[in-house]
């Protein structure tokens, strides 16, 4: 009965509203906002209100969608309510990130106060509604209702992607340099549909009143002002919906479909996914229900992911402060383009390839086309055969498990950077990505000790930069917009590889105590707010005043200057194949000048590797731990 009432409330909320209406004068919040607040821990609601103002004044999205997996269609309506706070509203923007690749979603039948209005489309991913003829006064809200319709493209077939073509580039394979994309964020597989960006959202605006830039084809898709969301998603029986927020229940429809409802509070994004044949494991950490959703075939890995996530959340809450939400979900997803995961407030996805790799490399290799060629390439390193614990396959198992753990840690860290501490992922991607990378290393140190963390630092950060340099990439400034990178190899090497090492250098300068004190102060200060590029450096300077000037010089060196070779040394193959200590042939390969293709000519197994099929090459990319942990 409770679920039915919630569903009725959501349905009524979508039935119509005036163009603008007076905002609530004081608590208690409206019934709709009270539903949303179930997503926040009781102790965190006051904290959120202190940072954001009255929570009932946040933007409110009322979402009603229907998904047809067989037809790959999504249809429905979205109502956006935005309060005019200090100044009148003269225009309203909506961002639709799936349209960055092509026009996949369409907004139509727009209404304001029941009156039809015309939306402009100044950019492929941006819609605009002019309110200049009737500005919304401060204290009132604009309520825009639009119809959403889209055809979800089929998911791309597994390919070398962003992690690589890395080995392809190193060895002369056909992978080439990746061109970017959305990594399957808006795509359909037979049993999984990713609908990231299907809900049009109001982008933040700069001081000039213009909206922040949309996705550039490299890096993340976008981030938004904290908002409340009420959503219902209807799917065929046998399918399930995964979304950010507190679950409001599942209601069977008369036609056999099932309607799922969610309520979310103070979230910077609202992702949606639909799956079939998934299983779920749950645990509780400090009032947070942690859920791991995975294919039934990958239950063992899915349960390990749950253990990783609960352990990480425990450690991060202890040192960085509590996660404000009551639910946190980790969802297995068939990501493409070499992505290891994607982050959203209260929900992250982890690539299926990591679940399969961690479950057993020998199973991945069994019967794989080109296996004979793959073994020949292994022979290049003096490692023919050797499927036992000490051989290549055994070591690959360990490498993939470390990559899985590090990737989950990276995505959980994103709950703080930039889920809580907001930053512009398009203009300033180095801000949140570098801290998510380094926080993942900190977790490994807290959990497994400094030796393990240092090994992963070499493999995942230093190794990624070295591999990029060995494939002909040039060092450069890490602190720049995503659209200013040539490709995802350069973006990954500088933003995920080199930039996080600023925090390692800063930590060595000020000491562990001051570093962790500053990190906690940074989260507390900018919780639910927007940070800046030098804000963390300023917190470090407060914790260690004597090192203020030196800290600023370090930030310039690691983020602005091109001194990676000077700081990280000559590339070494050992750092690229971290965890594969003792492989014969590494020394011979390392001695080759530049490690370029011409220098590799004549090595045993090279020709076989060049002729590997795409699936085998993709597997080999898994040998470089951390490259999928983006």
Image (cartoon, rainbow, N blue to C red):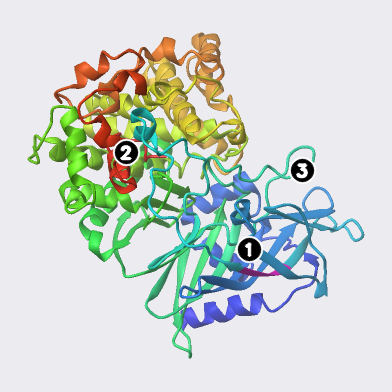
Q: Establish if 349 lies above or below 499.
A: below
The crowding category of the residue bearing disc 3, from other C-alpha atoms within 10 Å (few below 14, some 14 to 19, many at least 20), is few
Check contact, mark 1 vs mark 3: CB within 8 A.
no
Q: Return the residue nearer the eye: 363 or 50.
A: 363
Position of residue 274 measured from the top left corner of the image (x, y, whole percent):
44, 67
| Quarter of the rendering containing residue 501 | top left
The stretch of residues the image draws in magenta is: 145-149
Q: Residues within 10 Å of mark 1 (few under 14, many from 20)?
A: many
Name the magenta segment's main secondary structure. strand
Q: How many labels does the image show?
A: 3
Residue at mark 1: 105
Q: Is residue 257 above or below residue 38?
A: below
Q: In this view, does 333 lie to the left or right of 560?
A: left
* Mark in front: 1 vs 3: 1
Q: Earlier in the sequence, mark 1 or mark 2?
A: 1
Q: Is mark 3 on a helix, strand or loop?
A: loop
Callout 2 secondary element: helix
Q: Residue 210 carries which label?
A: 3
Q: Which of marks 1 and 2 is in front?
A: 2
Q: Residue at x 39, y 47 (%)?
A: 159
Is the C terminus in the top left, top right, bottom left or bottom right quadrant?
top left
Q: In this view, does 479 lie above or below 84?
A: above
**x, y percent for residue 258:** 45, 80
Taking the view exactly as shown, the residue that stands out farthest to the right is: 133
For discs 2 and 3, the disc positioned in front in the rendered view: 2
What's the CA distance linking mark 2 and mark 3?
A: 40 Å
Name the one closer to the observer, 230 or 398.
398
Q: Which residue lies most toward the bottom here? A: 254
Category of crowding for the residue at label 2, using alpha-carbon neighbours closer than 10 angstroms: few (below 14), some (14–19), many (at least 20):
many
Q: Which mark is residue 621?
A: 2
Residue 515 position within the rendered picture, expressed as x and y whole percent measured from the top left: 42, 22
């Amino acid at each position: 009965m409770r679920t039915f009432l919630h569903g009725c409330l959501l349905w009524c909320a979508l039935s119509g509203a005036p163009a603008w209406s007076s905002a609530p004068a004081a608590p208690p919040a409206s019934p709709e906002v009270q539903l949303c607040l179930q997503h926040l821990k009781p102790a965190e609601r006051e904290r959120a209100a202190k940072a954001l103002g009255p929570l009932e004044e946040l933007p409110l999205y009322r979402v009603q969608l229907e998904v047809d997996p067989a037809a790959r269609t999504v249809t429905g309506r979205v109502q956006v309510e935005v309060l005019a706070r200090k100044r009148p509203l003269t225009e309203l923007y909506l961002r639709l990130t799936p349209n960055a690749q092509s026009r996949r979603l369409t907004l139509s039948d727009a209404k304001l106060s029941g009156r039809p209005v015309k939306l402009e489309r100044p950019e492929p991913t941006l819609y605009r509604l002019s309110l200049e003829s009737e500005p919304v006064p401060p204290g009132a809200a604009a309520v825009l209702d639009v119809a959403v319709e889209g055809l979800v493209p089929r998911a791309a077939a597994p390919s070398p992607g962003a992690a690589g073509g890395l080995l392809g580039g190193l060895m002369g394979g056909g992978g080439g340099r990746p061109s970017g994309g959305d990594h399957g964020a808006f795509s359909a597989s037979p049993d999984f549909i990713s609908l990231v960006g299907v809900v049009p959202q109001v982008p933040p605006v700069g001081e000039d009143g213009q909206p922040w830039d949309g996705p550039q084809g490299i890096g993340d898709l976008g981030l938004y002002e904290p908002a409340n969301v009420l959503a219902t998603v209807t799917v065929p029986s046998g399918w399930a919906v995964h979304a950010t927020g507190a679950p409001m229940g599942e209601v069977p429809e008369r036609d056999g479909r099932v309607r799922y409802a969610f309520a979310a509070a103070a979230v910077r994004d609202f992702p949606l996914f639909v799956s079939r044949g998934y299983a779920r494991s749950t645990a509780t950490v400090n009032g947070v229900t942690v859920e791991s959703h995975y294919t039934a075939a990958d239950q063992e890995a899915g349960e390990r992911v749950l253990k990783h996530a609960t352990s990480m959340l425990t450690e991060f809450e202890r040192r960085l402060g509590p996660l404000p939400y009551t639910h946190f979900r980790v969802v297995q997803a068939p990501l493409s383009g070499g992505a290891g995961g994607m982050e959203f407030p209260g929900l992250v996805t982890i690539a299926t390839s990591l679940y399969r790799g961690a479950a057993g490399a020998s199973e991945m290799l069994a019967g794989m086309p080109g296996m004979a060629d793959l073994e020949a390439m292994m022979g290049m390193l003096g490692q023919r055969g050797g499927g036992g614990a000490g051989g290549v396959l055994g070591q690959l198992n360990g490498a993939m498990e470390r990559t899985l753990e590090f990737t989950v840690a990276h995505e959980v860290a994103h709950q703080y950077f930039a889920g809580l501490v907001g930053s512009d992922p398009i203009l300033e991607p180095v801000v949140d990505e570098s801290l998510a990378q380094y926080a993942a290393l900190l977790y490994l140190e807290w959990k497994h000790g400094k030796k393990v963390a240092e090994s992963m630092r070499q493999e995942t950060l230093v190794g990624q930069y070295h591999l990029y340099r060995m494939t002909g990439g040039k060092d450069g400034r890490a602190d720049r917009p995503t659209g200013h990178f040539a490709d995802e190899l350069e973006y990954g090497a500088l933003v995920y590889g080199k930039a996080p090492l600023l925090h390692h250098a800063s930590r060595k300068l000020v000491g562990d105590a001051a570093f962790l004190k500053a990190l906690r102060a940074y989260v507390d200060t900018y919780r639910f707010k927007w940070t800046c590029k030098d804000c963390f450096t300023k917190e470090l300077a407060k914790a260690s005043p004597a090192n203020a000037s030196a800290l600023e010089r370090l930030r310039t060196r690691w983020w602005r200057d091109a001194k990676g070779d000077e700081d990280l040394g000559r590339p070494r193959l050992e750092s690229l194949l971290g965890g594969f200590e003792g492989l014969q042939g590494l020394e011979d390969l390392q001695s080759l000048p530049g490690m370029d293709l011409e220098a590799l000519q004549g090595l045993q197994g090279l020709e076989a590797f060049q002729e590997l099929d795409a699936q085998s090459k993709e597997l080999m990319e898994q040998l470089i731990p951390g490259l999928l942990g983006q």
